[in-house]
Image (cartoon, rainbow, N blue to C red):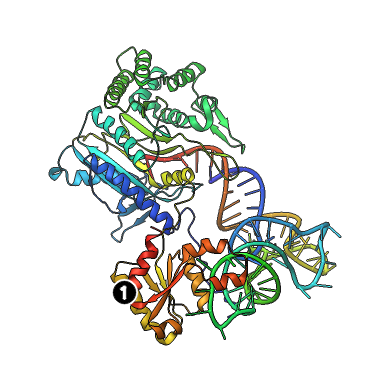
RNA sequence: GCCGCCAUAGCUCAGUUGGUUAGAGCGCCAGAUUGUGGAUCUGGAGGUCCCCCGUUCAAGCCGGGGUGGCGGUACCA
């Protein structure tokens, strides 16, 4: 037993992945059911696609290289084709829609849920496998589809228990940002690289603040660890122009839209973006969602495939961690219009818009909001095995309980009664069934209510009182097993 | 990827200027209590001091390298 073995396999979880226990799984199930009900109320239907896709379908080959992007988990199939684990649920949807285009109703409203994988550096609240819950409308070109996505995202957040006012859905439009780029002379394909740097800088507004963004728009910025990030090299006037747009958010949506029109007096991408945002704002106000969905020109979102409106759901409540430091949950979901994505597979562009809820992150936020995961669900009734020769009778009792729809198990370990009671306690069992020789000879069983018993125990400090009073237990004829167990369970459901 | 910090029991951590057999609390197991989860008391199990190389009469402690973890930053489609 103590012989040192050198060939032991280390039991270790890969970095950035997580095991999940019963309480967390129950919370996930409850949350996803609430989201599912919301989406179905809005007329979306479920589909599921596999975890793997051909890498080219995900669009993740490195430019000019015969190798997938390092951020995706990839492997070569035995026919030498690259496969990758999906990194979101949108690219697989685009593949599915293109492949089944003729037989799908258009517009096609669908939702899907499941794990996605990213081969990136994990951090607190950032994993390499996490859950997303997406909804998309394919084949609806107008901004009314985008407005609907924003409203449904608000409904979904409320369905999982986030109160109105504790979240906000922000909407922007890529065309606004394109308009700014044109205005500061970064239009045209030759400036694509610098536009990307500008967008990344804008995306860091919440974290770095306006001054940090200004530094990144100009020469660059040195962070706390002394690392230097090169900036976009804009001159001061251009940087101010960009920052002004980000601050264009006003007291209400229609005012924000007006300000954006003022920023773009001439026809072009910016003006078109302002017009689209204005239309979204009108629809949202008319539908009564104006207090939950706001225009916010600082929203950037994913950097590649969005072509029009983009949206992001943020939690606004503040929570402190165990050291008293504020936790920022930030974005728990987002999306936008991606009119070009399905078009990668088909001759025609197919308009599409959708969003994704980050289930894992949302669940972490809710846990912080409501305190720990709800108390672990009640475990099974545990039938103690006090006497090896009579374990068959214990099994019969467990079977009787199961037949009545009551979860029950016979203790199968090798330990004595005290350890069996501890086991039942640890399983969160509401009740144990005790039948030693005394009860057996009389055709009786003793039932102990563990939850009432624990309460009674708290009031007793004396050992002999504790053993003699035997709180919260009854001895009844064996035929009454189901009835009496039900009576105990009914006290705790 | 880059920068910084850290690594001692299942967990949280002590460990003196380098000096015998490396400790505590919590947790776990058991006994006190021949049939009762709590409380109390007693006992027990549990360690490659992350790994390798070096310095030294002597390394948990000093030096170098590696690995792993944490934080910042970059990337995050």
> Does A84 sit left or right of A21 as displayed?
left
Q: Position of residue A409 (x, y in %)?
A: 38, 72
Q: Position of residue B67 (x, y in %)?
A: 57, 58
Q: Where in the figure is residue A115, as x and y percent of width and height?
A: 36, 51
User: Observer-nearest residue: A31 or A405?
Assistant: A405
* Label tally: 1
Q: Chain of mark 1?
A: A
Determine whether B16 is above or below B30 in the image. above
Residue in the foreground of this view, choosing between A260 and A254: A254
**Residue A292 found in image quarter:** top left
Residue A298 on image: x %, y %: 42, 26
Q: Is A348 placed left or right of A419 in the picture?
A: left
Locate the C terminus of chain A by quadrant: bottom left
Relative side of A157 to A424, left or right = left
Quadrant where the image shows the N terminus of chain A: bottom right
**Which residue carries the number 1 mark?**
A400
Q: Residues within 10 Å of mark 1 (few under 14, many from 20)?
A: some
Query: Can residue A381 be seen at all in this image of the molecule?
Result: yes
User: Which of B74/A82 is in front?
Assistant: B74
Q: Is residue A316 left or right of residue A261?
A: right
Q: Residue at x 29, y 37 (%)?
A: A354
Q: Residue at x 51, y 28 (%)?
A: A231
Question: Where is residue A475, by image quadrant?
Answer: bottom left
A306 shown above or below A11: above
Residue A66, can we see it?
no
Secondary structure, mark 1, is helix
Q: Residue furthest bottom?
A: A389
User: Please, is residue A260 above or below residue A110 in the view?
Assistant: above
| Residue drawn at x 33%, y 67% as measured from the top left | A406
């Amino acid at each position: 037993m103590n012989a040192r073995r050198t060939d032991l396999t280390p039991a270790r979880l890969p970095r950035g992945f997580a095991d999940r226990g019963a309480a967390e799984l129950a919370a996930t199930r409850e949350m996803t059911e609430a989201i599912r009900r919301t989406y179905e109320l809005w007329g979306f239907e479920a589909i599921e696609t596999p975890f793997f896709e051909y890498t080219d379908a995900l669009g993740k080959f490195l430019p000019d290289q015969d190798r997938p992007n390092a951020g995706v988990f990839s492997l070569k199939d035995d026919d030498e084709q690259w496969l990758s684990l999906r990194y979101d649920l949108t690219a697989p949807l685009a593949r599915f829609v293109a492949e089944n285009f003729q037989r799908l109703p258009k517009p096609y409203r669908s939702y899907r849920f499941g794990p996605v994988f990213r081969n990136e550096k994990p951090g607190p609240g950032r994993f390499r496998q996490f859950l997303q819950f997406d909804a998309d409308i394919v084949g609806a070109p107008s901004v009314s589809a985008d407005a609907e996505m924003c409203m449904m995202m608000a409904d979904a957040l409320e369905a999982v228990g986030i109160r109105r006012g504790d979240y906000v859905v922000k909407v922007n439009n890529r065309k606004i940002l394109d308009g700014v780029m044109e205005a500061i002379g970064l239009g045209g394909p030759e400036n694509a690289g610098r536009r990307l740097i500008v967008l990344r800088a804008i995306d860091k507004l919440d974290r770095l603040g306006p001054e940090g963004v200004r530094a990144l728009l100009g020469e660059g910025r040195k962070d706390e660890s002394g690392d230097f990030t090169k900036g976009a090299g804009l001159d001061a006037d251009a940087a101010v122009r960009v920052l002004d747009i980000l601050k264009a958010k006003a007291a209400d949506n229609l005012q924000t839209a007006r300000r954006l029109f003022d920023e773009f007096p001439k026809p072009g991408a910016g003006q078109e973006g302002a017009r689209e945002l204005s239309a979204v704002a009108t629809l949202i106000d008319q539908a009564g969602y104006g207090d939950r969905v706001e225009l916010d020109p600082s929203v950037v979102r994913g950097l590649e495939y969005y072509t029009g409106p983009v949206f992001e759901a943020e939690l606004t409540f503040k929570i402190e961690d165990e050291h008293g430091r504020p936790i920022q949950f930030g974005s728990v979901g987002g999306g936008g219009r991606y009119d070009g994505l399905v078009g990668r597979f088909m001759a025609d562009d197919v308009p599409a818009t959708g969003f994704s809820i980050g289930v894992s992150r949302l669940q972490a936020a809710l846990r912080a909001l409501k305190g720990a995961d709800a108390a672990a669900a009640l475990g099974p009734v545990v039938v103690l095995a006090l006497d090896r020769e009579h374990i068959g009778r214990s099994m019969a009792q467990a079977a009787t309980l199961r037949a009545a729809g009551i979860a029950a198990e016979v203790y199968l370990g090798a330990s004595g009664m005290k350890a069996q009671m501890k086991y039942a306690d640890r399983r969160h069992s509401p009740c144990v069934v005790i039948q030693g020789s005394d009860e057996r000879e009389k055709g009786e069983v003793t039932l102990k209510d563990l939850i009432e018993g624990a309460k009674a125990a708290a009031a007793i400090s004396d050992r002999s009182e504790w053993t003699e009073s035997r709180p919260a237990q009854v001895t009844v004829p064996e035929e009454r097993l189901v009835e009496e167990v039900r009576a105990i369970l009914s006290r705790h459901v």
